[in-house]
Amino acid sequence: MEYNFRDIEQRWQQYWRDNKTYKVKEDSSKPKFYVLDMFPYPSGAGLHVGHPLGYIASDIYSRYKRLQGYNVLHPMGYDAYGLPAEQYAIQTGQHPAVTTQKNITRYREQLDKIGFSYDWDREIRTCEPNYYKWTQWAFIQMFNSYYNNDTQKAESIDSLIARFAEKGTEGLNAACSEELSFTAEQWNAMSEKEQQQTLLNYRIAYLGDTMVNWCPALGTVLANDEVSEGVSVRGGHPVEQRLMRQWCLRVSAYADRLLKSLDTLNWTDSLKETQKNWIGRSEGAEMQFKIQNSDIEFTIFTTRADTVFGVTFMVLAPESEYVNQVTTPEQKEAVENYIQSIKHKTERERQMDKTVSGVFTGAYAINPLTNQPVPVWVSDYVLAGYGTGAIMAVPAHDSRDYAFAKHFELPIIPLIEGCDVSEESFDAKEGKMINSCGNGLDLNGLDVKEAIVRTKAFIAEKGLGRVKTNFRLRDAIFSRQRYWGEPFPVYYKDGMPYMLKENQLPLELPEIDSFLPTQSGEPPLGHAKNWVNDEGFPLELCTMPGFAGSSAYFLRYMDPHNDEALVSKSVNEYWRNVDLYIGGTEHATGHLIYSRFWNKFLYDLDIICEDEPFKKLVNQGMIQGRSNFVYRIKDTNTFVSLNLKDQYDVTPIHVDVNIVSNDILDIDAFRNWNPEYKNAEFILEDGRYVCGWAVEKMSKSMFNVVNPDDIVEKYGADTLRLYEMFLGPLEQSKPWDTNGIDGVHRFLKKLWNLFFARPEDAIADTAPTKEELKSIHKLIKKISSDIENFSFNTSVSAFMICVNELTALKSKNKQVLSDLVICLAPFAPHISEELWHQLGHKTSVVDASFPAFNEEYLKEDVVNYAISFNGKVRFNIEFAAETPKDEIEKTALSHELAAKWLEGKTPKKVIVVPNKLVNIVL
RNA sequence: GCCCGGAUGGUGAAAUGGUAGACACGCAGGACUUAAAAUCCUGUGGCCAUAACGGCUGUGUGGGUUCAAGUCCCACUCCGGGUACCA
């Protein structure tokens, strides 16, 4: 009997569909387990072999958990809104909804072939009204909430309004865009519009002025990615920094909680570190500096309050509102020229650029501790978005300030005893303070850390500033000047935003006839007819960004068809949150911050019962492409094999990896691949054409995209699944290379032969032998620990070893083979299901129980010890298990081979590591 | 620039501080076959040596800790990801 994977896989996939094998319902009699994949954006290129890597891993885990008796939720859906579909629409006129639907259909076909255990009845698509209704709904909740710093949670904006009416801002401790101060009388005297404007300062979803990359020619805002050296990547049009009123989410209000609860998560340390750095908590102080001969005062933030005596200049970000206020008439032109010169640079380009640049404003600020004037400069190394957009510069103890001071020949005053600042700054927070006395504060002789504490206390006491904790984390800009995204449930009255009523949701995305911005530079929705609410007020023209739909999708899978709520309370209390989340590290700071924020917000409103969405998170590595090359001799149609190419003047040309096998070119396929090569000639080596190769990004243009369908077609889904795991550790990035796939496929054939070779021996339902038990229990132990450690590559090796051993033992034992099949079922479900039934079992292997491991079967009678001299292994000795240490030492030293290495010396030391080795130190 | 990873044979890789290269691919030789495919067996890090035993060396580079380092520490090189509007 042959291993016919096509027949087996189709048959069992049909069986699973017919029997709804993977359908899940809430079941309080079983413990729950929620395994989630980061859902894909359905791109036009289709699924490539990189996508299933994480999906296979999570599928193995889900199936394993089910074998252990858990009720496993394992859903899949599509992140269906996005820029590529819109770009494609602009180019081809095809509606994004049409191409998206087409791509989803293709993705689904591809996913189905791999044999995943998804409950497809729970599928979601972010672009469907019944899904994005809840994205819009959540946005309305955010608009109607503010963040109370005293209770550390989001609360109703109505309670804030009531508070304002009663006592104004007195005693208010709320997250806000700027600190405001007004009385109840002032509040009550405000017009509706003024009140609404004031409330935006507190709402969690608010309209704010933010800096964006504006491209006037394209009439749109661009991502940093889409801008290079001041011009748009697409079209090469100039791009400038521009202030724009956009929807924002007050993510920064949650900064402290996002940071603190990282400790409760089972994520890798590096990922937590990345999030910590992204949130960027720093404790410091805000201080006011007065401008000399003026009423103007500006605020700076510093973490080094101890260095105020070393301030020799101040620096403002080019976008700082203080720039215009403080610049003197004489310097106005220079400052404007400078700002103009850096206006085209993106934030990232600015940070990467090491060259020092800046301009003097003509103004001087008074150092509040020395009363000395220091010049105020403008430079792009200070970012408007962080802190207050203004800094006090202490060149002696900050490397960026130091570079600036050296460049512009500004003074450098050392403040720490013994530090040498002639070549570089002394940034470390250690040492004894010097040169630091004045205005009633004396830091001299104090340790840096003490000095920081002392200074903070001093400035707070004297009213020079206040102690402040700053975060690098910024509020999320939530508007996109695009079409293919969720419409905002917002209309404008008298220039102020108002929310639609919940019963008016979903606000569906309207049809438009052009996906480009309007003539007047409005977003594409400006083309929509009757884009007004039922009272005739205009609706918002922007749409929501990609992360809107992906921030709470894990909740919707719990209760995907609920029309009354995002998720019902009881269902949410059963599934709670995601136990295992698998996806790429590229989401470390975007998606994983936004969805944690979104989740915490919903938790504050008591809509869900867990404040963190993803308990455990595993990052799968990226699968890169492995490109193949042929070498054409210049100006000919002759191609020379890899190892002969150096004898000619050749041009390497990318060749489709699908017509290359183990780096050997299929010459006929190559001739048919492109008419240009129809009459190609070849210079072969050993009768074959060997291709060159390189690791590159997997993309159409490199001809290195491998579709999982092709692998399934050729080897079957089980081989694909095993091979993707066999490639290497899940978390590691690696190039896709089919060179090893035959080995995995051969393994499945060997397994098959274990059952069907030697037909004269029937499957025996008898007691297994000692050797059989040892082999299978070694496997059971290895597989369970591997799955729990996400070490799936070593599992595949373990299966190979076990099957090799059982083949050598000629085992046909029913009990042993049944255990083997259950272990393999999470990895290769189709062949396992087939063999399971061949063993005479009547129900699906999916519903079996994972075999229990018994240590007894693994006990060894003899142990092989390595005998080493000065750490180098010289020979081996076998000892009976449990041989005492001193006897091992004695035997090793008196062994006939030992004399050669002892050279007559007496060992200084002998180390015996039980069950491992002996090291004799000479 | 900044933050987070990674580097081990011809290739993918394995290795709680304890015999580096398990398991595979590829390659070489052999068996079966009219032949090929498939399958099976043997060998396979490098260098030296050999009739045979064997010896030296080796985990990106340079240092260090340790009886013992691929693994821990310090400094570097190269590669990948992120860097807030790609998803």
Image (spheres, coloured by chain):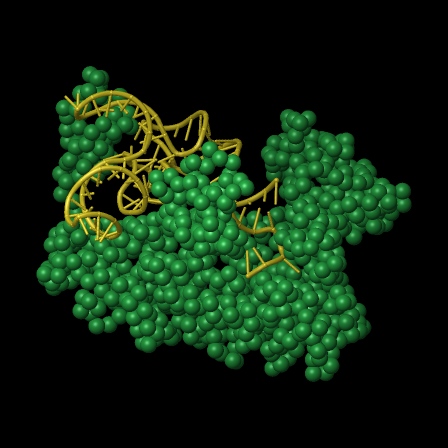
Chain colours: A green, B yellow
Camera-side residue of A87 and B4: A87
Image quadrant in which you'd find residue A911: top left
Camera-side residue of A758 and A394: A758
Could you tell me how many numbered marks the image carries? Answer: 0
Camera-side residue of A385 and A630: A630
Image quadrant in which you'd find residue A203: bottom right
Quadrant where the C terminus of chain A lies? top left
User: Where residue A553 sits: x, y (%)?
Assistant: 51, 68
Which residue: 86% across, 45% down?
Answer: A332
A792 relative to A815, above or below? above
Camera-side residue of A645 and A391: A645
B87 relative to A878, above or below? below
Which residue: 59% across, 77% down?
Answer: A506
Horizontal arrangement in the rendering, residue B45 relative to residue A904 (left or right): right
Quadrant where the N terminus of chain A lies? bottom left
A893 relative to A564, above or below? above
In this view of the protein, can residue A343 be seen by the observer? Answer: yes
User: Where residue A818 sits: x, y (%)?
Assistant: 20, 62
Horizontal arrangement in the rendering, residue A701 relative to residue A710 (left or right): right
User: Where residue A684 sits: x, y (%)?
Assistant: 39, 41
